[in-house]
Amino acid sequence: MRVVVFGHGPVGQAVTRRLVAGGDDVIVAQRSRPDGLTGARFAACDLLDREAVLAAAAGAEQIVLAAGFAYKSKVWRAAWPTAMSNVIEATRTTGARTVFVDNLYMYGPQHTPLREDMALTRGGRKPRVRADVTRLWQRAANLRFAALRAPDFYGPGVHQSHLGDQAFGNLAKGKPAMLLASPDIPHDFSYVPDIARAVVTLLEAPDDAYGQAWHVPSAPITTPRRILEIGARTIGVPVRIITLPPALLPVMGLFSPMLAEMSEMQFQWDRIYQVDASKFANRFWADATPFEVGVAVAARSFAEARVPDARRSAIPSV
């Protein structure tokens, strides 16, 4: 089966590896050819260029949208509606089935576990963008399109995440892990290989799984502190944590553009952030990778790399 994967970040890479291992004909489409691409073909493509998207998707039976844009509200407002419209057109033109790897911003602030049937928010800059692009695919007629939504994710080689360079990466260097919120508030995290498994599950599912959203199953919710303790124990270092209180983000955002972008997302960290994935679990599978396994793999990957890169920063990737 021919599958076009738009985007080759951590999730795109994991999806590509899984598809290639399964014998699919995989085309990775993005602006530049990724290093070390094996088992898959490459198509140069800018998601903001409609003709390029249609050309990359030509002949596809399945499409995976696993791309991301710079974590800036202005960029998201300009890029995401265009990219989504282009992928919708490619889905319609090819007759392919599309799985969109999405986040959970579109629900906005909530005080109960997040469910797929919650109303889409109209507040916030980035949450509103994600809600708007959701409405685009929901309103498009005659499409086989599904959204797979995941909370903050982690895994080997996942640098730009809350459990990335500034957390596991710092611990691997003998430094304190730096978090943007309390380490003791329970928070759901998805393991990247589990996200890839869920993507392939939907690609292999019957058509009735499309036209709707699904939440990725995660390991039972726990605190960032416990996750970091598992990672530190795995690589034999002490657990030290520095926390930047969310209340300071608006002030520090005056001096740091990235922290300014993060300040509106405090609702993800100032309360229990839990995702209800029972819909997916009841239909497909529920055996998400335990933290004891996934965190150990992730922590070891940072310990083995130990390559600082000042260009990376701790921001959500999806």
Image (cartoon, rainbow, N blue to C red):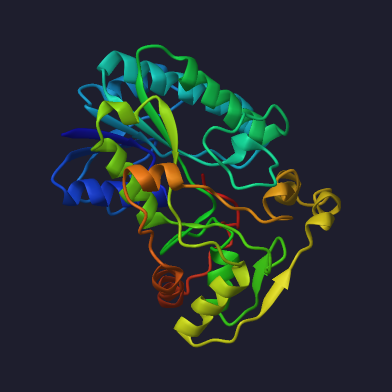
Judge whether residue 132 can be spotted in this image.
yes
Q: Is residue 95 above or below residue 238?
A: above
Front in this rendered view, residue 50 or 221: 221
Q: Image point 54% across, 28% down: which residue?
A: 80
How many numbered tags mark residues here? 0
Front in this rendered view, residue 118 or 195: 118
Q: Is residue 177 above or below residue 112?
A: below
In the rendered image, residue 43, in percent from the top left (x then y), is placed at 28, 33
Q: Image point 49% across, 15% down: which residue?
A: 139
Q: Image point 45% across, 47% down: which residue?
A: 278
Q: Is residue 130 above or below residue 224?
A: above
Residue at the extreme top? 141
In the rendered image, residue 248, in percent from the top left (x then y), is placed at 83, 57
In the rendered image, residue 133, in percent from the top left (x then y), is placed at 54, 25
Q: Is residue 252 above or below residue 117?
A: below
Front in this rendered view, residue 120 or 15: 120
State left or right for residue 96 relative to residue 80: left
Q: Image point 17% across, 52% down: which residue?
A: 21
Image-quadrant location for residue 64: top left
Residue at the extreme left? 23
State left or right for residue 291 relative to residue 164: left
In the rendered image, residue 179, in percent from the top left (x then y), is placed at 67, 65
Judge whether residue 12 can be spotted in this image.
no
Residue at the extreme front? 282
Q: Quadrant of the N terminus?
A: top left
